[in-house]
Amino acid sequence: MADWKNRIVGTGEVDPGELTPNPLNWRRHPSTQQAAVREALERLGWVQQVIVNRRTGRLIDGHLRVELARERGERVPVLYVDLEESEERLALATLDPLAALAEADDEVLARLLEDVQIEDGPLAEVISTLAGEELEAVHDPDPEYYTGKLDGLIYEPQESEPPPVAELYDTSKTSELEDAIMEADLPDDVRAFLMLAARRFTAFRYDRIAEYYAHASPEVQELMERLALVIVDYDQAIELGFARLSDALAEEYERVMGDA
């Protein structure tokens, strides 16, 4: 079996104005993330280098940190790698998605967060989310675009007609990623994998989904429940892995169900 290639060819510290953003960078950085990363840099400083392909001079990772450093006139620590253009595209496409495949060890995470005390600010919101105190994704500050928050799950029709299916989801980000993947020079298996990953960026509008569910046929309702687009049977949702109860909530749930 061949050894893994070491593509790292150097390090340095440069003026951010010398770094070239990658035109195929698909990551977008909303104001919430910008504020959190800015605070992390102010509290900790640089703990990770940005990645630059020496062959093309383009960034592969660290676009937001470079932009924030440019605003402050800070120099940027750089890790240089040597990649062909097709390899650069693969790295650009997969660095974040591959990291996102990691699963959390809730017990270890809880111990870690016990000693992380931040009272307020953007990083405090991130910590609260990691601790399970909020449902809404930190990376998306617009609650009407993509959110798990609802004022209440009401599965009775609130409107005379079901909403059009096109109102139930937004694939604009997915389509943008799919276009970039299709334009890239990639092996077929890598392209197929990335196309699957791109679907995770489809935004579901759960308020409209709930209304559609209320009008749907029993067959469609059953499928929507199995897909966790709505949850009406919490035992089934837990069994299928869509939801997880904390010990305290589980005890209260058992008590209430036992009294029912």
Image (cartoon, helix red, strand yellow):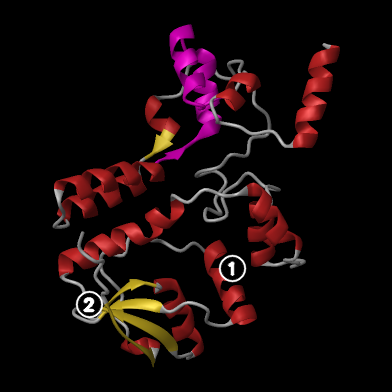
* Three-letter residue code for mark 1: Ala
Q: Which residue is mark 2?
A: 82
Q: Residues within 10 Å of mark 2 (few under 14, many from 20)?
A: some
Judging depth in this view, the residue of 161 and 193 nearest the camera is 193
- Quadrant of residue 26 in the image? bottom left
In the picture, the quarter occupied by the C terminus is top right
* Labels 2 & 1 near each other (Cβ < 8 A): no
* Among numbered discs 2 and 1, the one appearing first in the sequence: 1
Find the distance from the CA under tag 2 to the CA under tag 1: 31 Å
Q: Is residue 88 left or right of residue 41?
A: left
> Measuring 18% from the left and 50% from the top, which residue is drawn there?
182
In the image, the segment drawn in magenta is 202-230
With respect to residue 21, does 229 lie above or below? above
> Measuring 51% from the left and 20% from the top, which residue is drawn there?
225
Question: SS of the residue at dot 2?
Answer: loop
With respect to residue 224, does 128 lie above or below? below
Q: Is residue 161 left or right of residue 32?
A: left
In the picture, the quarter occupied by the N terminus is bottom left
Residue 34, given in percent of the width and then of the height, sits at: 53, 69
- Quadrant of residue 246 in the image? top right
Q: Which residue is mark 1?
A: 36
> Measuring 55% from the left and 30% from the top, which residue is drawn there?
241
With respect to residue 190, does 45 lie above or below? below
Q: Residues within 10 Å of mark 1 (few under 14, many from 20)?
A: some
Q: Is residue 209 magenta?
A: yes
Residue 56, given in percent of the width and then of the height, sits at: 19, 78
Q: Residue furthest toward the front?
A: 1
What number is the disc on residue 176?
A: none
